[in-house]
Image (spheres, grey):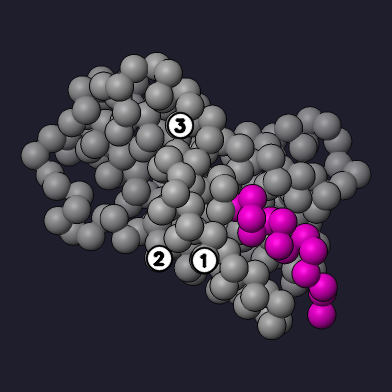
Amino acid sequence: MLASPSFRRGIRDGLPILIAVGSLGVVYGILSIEAGFAGWVTVLASLLIVSGAAQFTLVGLAGEGIVPILVATTGLALRHVPMSAALSEMIRGRSRSTRLAMAWVLVDETFGLTLAAAGRGEGDLVAYKSAADVMLYAGWVVGTVAGVLVGEGVDPAAWGAEVFFALLFLGLSAPLIRTRWDVAVVVISVGAVFAAAEFLPAAWQITAAATVAAGIGAVVPDE
């Protein structure tokens, strides 16, 4: 698999994610230390959880108790249900162990790359996603370690860290928009995001908007 063209393309396409997610990892490491978490706990979370959304939520709610953390992370995690269903369809016929391995690093960034790769007829989606996951995982963990080493005293907002997520997802979504129906899904999804931000708790905004987008995407005709 490591020598396959699909794996090499996954490495290539995952390079921007390594840089962007690595930068986010630095921010997470800094914020986690500032929130009072030990450095080893911060790094271990990135090694095992591999979820920026959940880990940033954990840091943000560190002083609120276990119940708000569980509610918030559950809300965020529900978006993985439609993602995993779509991924399962894309790698239909692969072994159970392979599908479980693909589910471990099921994050928005590499899922988006894999979805785009499937749309253009990538030969081996498992090799492609595995390579992209390696890039993301390396960036996230190395970034976290760097953030822990930097520690307190640095303000991530001062260097525009809050725009990384938006720019990253804009870059991922652009190649997926190919028809007027795709544009319609995007417009409705953006509306759902604003509505969720206005009326729903923060932890449920992403899942709610993603559910609406997935539902619309499932019913609009293909071209």
Q: Residue 124: x percent and y percent?
A: 78, 56
Q: Amino acid at mark 3?
A: Ala
Give the labeled residue for mark 3.
72
**Span colored in magenta:** 210-223
* Label 1 neighbour load within 10 Å: few <14, some 14-19, many 20+: some
> Of marks 3 and 2, which one's residue comes earlier in the chain?
3
Q: Residue 104: x percent and y percent?
A: 63, 34
Q: Residue 145: x percent and y percent?
A: 31, 35
Instruction: Please indicate, yes or no, whether residue 179 appears anywhere in the rendered image.
Output: yes
Instruction: Please indicate, yes or no, whether residue 47 appears anywhere in the rendered image.
Output: no
The C terminus lies in quadrant? bottom right
Tell me the residue at 64%/50% (across/down). 211
Q: Quadrant of residue 38?
A: top left
Q: Quadrant of residue 8?
A: bottom right
Tell me the residue at 40%/16% (across/down). 66
- Asked if residue 57 is positioned above or below residue 223 in the image, the reply reads above
Q: Given contact means CB atoms under 8 Å apart, are the residues at marks 3 and 2 in contact?
A: no
Q: In the image, 29: left or right of 214?
A: left
Q: In the image, 185: left or right of 170?
A: right
Give the labeled residue for mark 1.
190
Q: Secondary structure at mark 2?
A: helix
Residue at the limit of the structure toward the front, as seen here: 199
Mark 1 → mark 2, Cα distance in angstroms: 15 Å
Q: Secondary structure at mark 1?
A: helix
Queried whether the magenta region covers residue 222, the answer comes back as: yes
> Of marks 3 and 1, which one's residue comes earlier in the chain?
3
Which of the labelled discs sits on residue 167, or is there none? 2
Q: Amino acid at mark 1?
A: Val
Q: Secondary structure at mark 3?
A: helix
